[in-house]
Structures are given as C-alpha cells and as structure tokens.
Image (tube, grey):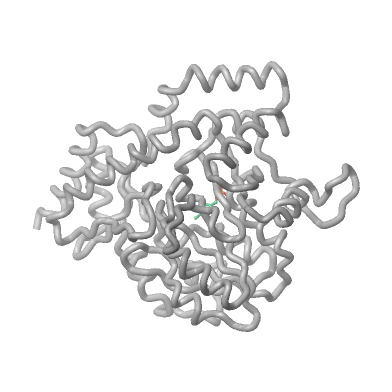
Amino acid sequence: MVDLAGQYQKIKPEVDQAIAEILTNTSFINGPAVRQFQSNLEKYLNVKHVIPCANGTDALQVAMMALNLQPGDEVITTSFTFIATAEVIALLQLTPVLVDVLPDTFNIDPEAIERAITPKTRAIVPVHLFGQCADMDRIMEIAHKHQLYVIEDNAQAIGADYFSKDGSTSKAGTIGHIGCTSFFPSKNLGCYGDGGAIFTNDDQLAEQMRIVVNHGMKVRYYHDVVGINSRLDSIQAAILDIKLKRLDDYAKARQYAAEYYNRAFAQCDKLKTPQTATFTTHVFHQYTLVTHCVNRQQLMDHLQSKGIASAIYYPVPLHLQKAYLDPRYQKGDFPVTEQLCKTVISLPIHTEFDDETLEYVTSSVLEFVNKD
Ligand SMILES: *Cc1c(COP(=O)(O)O)cnc(C)c1O
C-alpha cells in the first residue's frame, strides 16, 4: 500500500547522518532533536504548542486525561474509524457515543453529533478520515453552544488545510481545543518506528499534557497527577524533522496519484471516486473507492494476482466490533457506516509512484470491474 523503501532511498544520506549523530552523542531521550522537531512542527502547523509523545493512541489518551474527564462522561465520536479513537475512551472508563458519517466524505455527520448530545456529554472527537477535514466550523459551533471540548483525531490528515467560513485557513488538528496525530511509518508524516504528537493553542492544557506524558510530574520525583510515560525518542524526531520539510511535496505526490485514479475511474459507474468537501484540502492518507455491484473480494484477489496491494479500511463498524458490543447499539443503527464497511476498497497510495505504475493499477482495476 505504501513505498517506504523508495521514499527512504531519496533521503538516505540525510537520515543516515542524523541517526549516526544521535548514536554518537547518545541523547536518545529528550535530546535536542526532539526540541528542534517540536519547534519546526509548531511553525509548520502555526500552533502554539506541540507535545511529542510515543504514538497516536497515547496522544488521544493524554488529551482525554488532561481534560480531567470522569468515568461515565460521554465522548461522541464516529462509528467509521480506526479502533484507537474509541479504545482510549473505553480505557479511561468514559462512555463512547457513536454517530454515523456522511456518505460522500466518510467524515462524522455534525447534525448526528448534535442529536447525540446528552447532559453527560463532555467532548467530541472528530476524525479527519483518510486525509480530509471533518466539518470543523459546524462542529465547533455545536461544541461552543453545548460547552464541549473538541479533540481532533488528525492521525490521517496532517498537512491538510481547513478553510473556515470566516475566511481563515488553518492546518488540520489546530482548530479544536486539542489535536492528536500519529507518526506510524505508513502515516503521511511517518517515522521509522512509533511516534505521535498533541497540538494545542491553550497554554494551560499544554502544561497539563506535558505533565501527563511525563509520569504526572513537573518537578522531578514530585507527582501531582497520575500520568503515563509517553515520549518521542530522538532518532524518530530527527527522521521526522527531515521528512517534515518534504511533507507538502509528499502531499502533492499523493494528490497527483489520486487525480490520476480519479480520471481513470471517472466513467466507471461501478466505482465512486473519493469526494473532497469544499472547506478542506485532501492529503490522501488513503485513496478509497466505494464499489457498486462489484464482488469486492474477487477484485482484491484479482489485484493480488497482479502484484497489486489493496485493503479495506474498515471492514467492521465500531459498534459491531466484539470488544465494543453494547446493548445501546444494534446492527442497522449506523446505515452509512455499515454500507461503507461492505463496499469500500482502498488502493495503494504513496509518494513514489510513476505514471506507468498508476496506469498498471488503474487498468488492472478496470479490467476486473468491466469484465461483465
Ligand atoms: C493510526 C491511527 C491512530 C493511532 O495511531 P498509532 O500511532 O498507531 O497509535 C489513531 N487514530 C486514527 C484515525 C489512526 O489512523
């Protein structure tokens, strides 16, 4: 689905030298490379505080811990996302409240959020799924009206721009009270191991989150709150700093591939190409088609036989996952999500395509889809 080896080859001398430097100066944890990356990411995102941490799941957990949410508090999120989003809500003994997504963008339906609000609701976690922003103007409006926190799960859309109704442009993840991201290798800004970060413009929340990621301490060995240990290591930070400089070019390469796919599939009524909302750019963490009257498994088998990867993000809606079964929810409750889980397919998308490969992928897809 990605070509991390090809991408590495192009930045190898720079990466190898940065790693070698850290091996020599042994500043593995909290070294200058971490501070430098943090500061460069703050500038890139135009956000006051970036708090690096160990992975994207921790980022979400730390955000919820810093908001001091209490067991039983309700957190509204989407039924169509990677499990991490709901996992941390459940781990903290908060109550996940799921809502359906919009059929065109696959992102959380703001009107469904408003309908799901109860006196126990404390926070909303929109996910900027597959690389484009959810409708943040509407979500922030609902949050202000009901005095709720907004935590953006930006693991898939780092670098995307959000165009607000007021004319301002913001980077994805910097609009809500807190934004969270992941630097998992296959993410748009990926390191060579695990990594994550939290963003906020709120000084107090930033201070609280810095305490939470560091065992709940501000002064060494004095623990004011129960925290966790969640750090980005220096080697990963150095790699990320090198890739951050290229993040916009990486997004352009993904967009080029997505446009190529869109053109190739435009006339095919069995494939619906991904739609981008007007208020956001799309950085195509995934390129996801909705199939119509196509045997999806056979299509995947066909692609595999031609050496082409494909994947289903995601095959099971959150409310039908075994660990998350809940008498509040039944099959049929989130019809858009349930239909998407049955019909979506994601094609390879990354930064290293040439036209020949894109042609091979698209013609292989069409060969199967058009055969009857
Ligand atoms: C990848 C991802 C996460 C978790 O990130 P990790 O670094 O793997 O913990 C959370 N939410 C979404 C939507 C993701 O895609």
In the depicted structure, whether residue 101 falls above or below residue 44: below
Residue at image x 52%, y 28%? 242
Q: Is residue 346 above or below residue 308?
A: below
Q: Quadrant of the N terminus?
A: top left
Q: Residue lying furthest right in this view?
A: 222
- The image position of residue 333, as x and y in percent, is 43, 79
Q: Nearer the viewer, residue 186 or 330?
A: 186
Query: Considering the image in quadrants, where does the C terminus appear?
Result: bottom left
Instruction: Return the residue found at the far left.
Output: 372
Residue drawn at 53 percent across, 58 percent down? 175
Q: Nearer the viewer, residue 371 or 363?
A: 363
Left/right of residue 40 with respect to residue 160 in the rendered view: right
**Residue at 88% across / 42% down in the picture?**
220
User: Can residue 323 be seen?
Assistant: yes
| The one of 95 and 234 positioned closer to us in this rendering | 234
Identify the residue at horizontal 16%, vertical 51% (top origin).
Answer: 368
Depicted 275 relative to depicted 156: above or below = below
Residue 190 screen position, x and y as percent: 50, 38
As drawn, 184 above or below 341: above
On the image, the x and y values in percent for residue 331 come to 42, 78
Q: Is residue 169 left or right of residue 65?
A: left
